[in-house]
Image: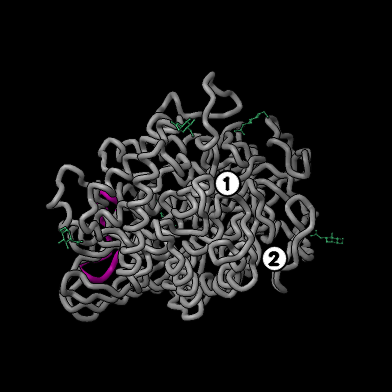
Amino acid sequence: MQMIASISVRSALAAVLALLSTNAVARPQTRQQHVKARDSNELVQPVYQALPLGSVKPQGWLKEQLELSANGLAGNLFNFYRFVKDSQWLGGNSEYSDLHESAGYWFNGLVPLSFGLDDARLKSQVKTFMDYVLGHQQDDGWIGPETTPQTRGLWGRCYIMLGLMADSSETDRIVDAMHRYIELVHSMLQNNFTGLIAKPVHIPLQWLYENHPKNNSDLIWETMELMIQGSTTFGVDWRNFFVEGTFPEVVYAPRSQSYPWLWTHGVNLAEAIYRTSHDEALKTQTRTAIDLVQKYHTSLAGTIIGDEAMTDNNPSRGAELCTSTELMFSLAWIYQYLADNDIADWAELTAFNAFPGQIWSDWWSHQYVQQENQPCCTVNHPQGYSKFLANSFVGTEDGGIAHVFLSPGSVSTHLGNNEVTISVDTNYPFGMDLSYSISADDDFKFYVRIPGWANSSSTARGGDSDGDVFLTNTGLHQFHVPKGQSAISISLQTEPRIIERANNTAAVYYGPLLYSLALESNETTRDPVAYNMGYIDPASTTAQTHDHVVETTDLWNIAIDPSQIKVASSGTTSKLADPIWAFGAPPLELRVAATEIEWPILFDTPADPPLDPQAKGKPFAARFVPFASAKVHMAHLPKLELETVDLDA
Ligand SMILES: *[C@@H]1O[C@H](CO)[C@@H](O)[C@H](O)[C@H]1NC(C)=O
Ligand SMILES: *[C@@H]1O[C@H](CO)[C@@H](O)[C@H](O)[C@H]1NC(C)=O
Ligand SMILES: *[C@@H]1O[C@H](CO)[C@@H](O)[C@H](O)[C@H]1NC(C)=O
Ligand SMILES: *[C@@H]1O[C@H](CO)[C@@H](O)[C@H](O)[C@H]1NC(C)=O
Ligand SMILES: *[C@@H]1O[C@H](CO)[C@@H](O)[C@H](O)[C@H]1NC(C)=O
């Protein structure tokens, strides 16, 4: 478990393509006004509308996680971390790369975190940063510290814009600054795509175009087109990449063409698959992109395998924390456009497995690369859960509301003139029951997303539901909620599932959680060491920043018999432990029939799973716990048929 303080240049680049890492919240609620003026250039509209930032508040374990984040690294980088505190964006000297992106990443995560928690201390960090940046906008409209054409890259501004558009506290000032900036960008791009890193950053432009176009619609539209043209000119047209037959299935057997680095880079991929534009064909292709990534490069815990270039799904391969962070947001965003239930399931899979599995339970340290079998993102990780929260409730096309990521929270918003407050009491994903308390001035439709893994014994009560769950074609259950106070509930039912992978291997799931062998381990905590084992500037650390080394001497080399699984503890409705993602904290456990096998270690990590595993000794009932709580992971295991094991033992 490696800590924070050092960000390598690679991880900086890794994070490069957060092209849609925006706050989904800020999406157009007022588009009609503009569409009238310019029908021909209408943007594709989402099926579900994100709600204004701050209207969804966390509860339960998710609130505790966000508070840990606020009291941990995310909420303290501003005070001690030189790539934020001493960033050139704030008049300082520290940048980890020429992209000048670290402060922008931080800002992009802090805005939703501060609004989600309604935290005055964090809001004042956001305000201080914004005041400085907008106060130092240059005369020609440039936002940021760079003054020469050689140093002025558009990319580093992406996150700044994403943060700005999400902050509804000073819209006029933000919109004015963005217009001045876009006019400059337009002229730069017209001049041989000056400043473009071939990753079009459209979301802030789309937001401006739909919500605050002023008299600049044509210019904004052209700027978006120039970005695409520029990418094509530079040989990185994502439309040519997400095509079956071209998309690399595995990079061990590469096709004869070579791919630009941007394409095969895991984080870039996570950030790229959510690009949505004005073109319906691109919307269809977005679905294809999801399918291709899912089929060839998705890890069992829900992230994209690639360390840092993407690879096949071999469990000795890893993924950066940045990848799951960006992917969660990408999936939330795409889900709002496509409304396909499996995409929301995938977002939850990432949010409850890959992402928390890479963060130390106190939120002061994180792991750069994680594998599914193994005994950067310092500035980017704060956006993970805060945007997941913001996207957990959405507006539906018929003017209702849907709870789509089933974590605990509440929402207060207006549906037209109907003021609605919905609060959900649940331990999900550590329990399968959800109880809603609703108050509304008028009748409305409320929906709850039923995950794809829930079985038909699941129930819905309250509103006009009498027990059975009925799914719409998008996987939502509909409640007709009357005005006044109401209580409704959902109880999900499911059984353990197996996912099979190449080379006769399998992984075990129960609900949205992947399970990993429970390995007792020793933790050693020490002062941070740089990723290359070099010197770390003490100015980049604080008393709470540590490296954690977690080692196990338990038996890890096992094969499992997936036909013998028992749910030993299926969750709870009472108060959960805090922090919840610590070893032993989640109230869920499985027992799986297992046996010891020969399995060598290679480069300090389990070698490829043996193709022909041989059982050693007597089979036994192995304890399995939620993947993200097990800091040493053994989750992708060889299969064997074993004699019957007493799973109650
Ligand atoms: C335009 O930019 C490309 C790539 O940066 C460069 O190779 C080319 O010389 C430039 N063309 C002109 C006319 O400046
Ligand atoms: C648009 O342009 C017109 C004429 O130039 C001007 O009167 C008007 O104020 C502008 N509107 C906005 C929103 O800037
Ligand atoms: C399957 O096993 C072979 C041989 O050990 C290995 O090269 C390959 O990467 C494995 N594939 C996966 C997806 O694990
Ligand atoms: C659904 O899962 C529950 C376990 O939670 C099980 O008791 C029930 O039989 C399953 N129902 C169906 C229809 O498979
Ligand atoms: C923890 O470390 C001690 C001392 O090195 C060792 O004896 C013990 O086996 C270790 N336990 C685990 C679970 O790794």
Q: Which residue is mark 1?
A: 13
N-terminal of the pair, mark 1 or mark 2, is 1
CB under 8 Å between discs 1 and 2: no
Q: In the image, 259: left or right of 463?
A: right
Query: Quick check: 222 above or below 243?
Result: below
Query: Quick check: 588 above or below 223?
Result: below
Q: Position of residue 390 (x, y in %)?
A: 39, 65
Asked if ligand 1 lies within 8 A of label 1, the reply is no
Q: Secondary structure at mark 1?
A: helix
Q: In the image, 517: left or right of 138?
A: right
Q: Which residue is mark 2?
A: 540
Residue drawn at point x = 27 percent, y = 60 percent: 468
Residue drawn at point x = 78 percent, y = 44 percent: 604
Span colored in magenta: 460-475
Q: How is the image coloured?
A: one colour
Q: Position of residue 205 (x, y in %)?
A: 33, 52
Number of residues whose C-alpha sits closer than 10 Å to that of mark 2, classed few (under 14), some (14–19) or many (20 or more): some
Q: Quadrant of residue 457?
A: bottom left
Residue 246 counted in the magenta span? no
Q: Nearer the viewer, residue 315 or 308?
A: 308
Q: In the image, 44: left or right of 68?
A: left
Query: Quick check: 464 above or below 644?
Result: below
Asked if residue 593 can be seen in this view, the reply is: no
Determine which of the numbered discs, if any, sits on residue 173 in the image.
Answer: none
Asked if residue 635 can be seen in this view, the reply is: yes
Q: Disc 1 versus disc 2: distance between alpha carbons?
A: 20 Å
Q: Nearer the viewer, residue 360 or 143?
A: 143
What amino acid type is highlighted by mark number 2?
Ser
Q: Position of residue 254 (x, y in %)?
A: 56, 24
Q: Nearer the viewer, residue 22 or 321?
A: 22
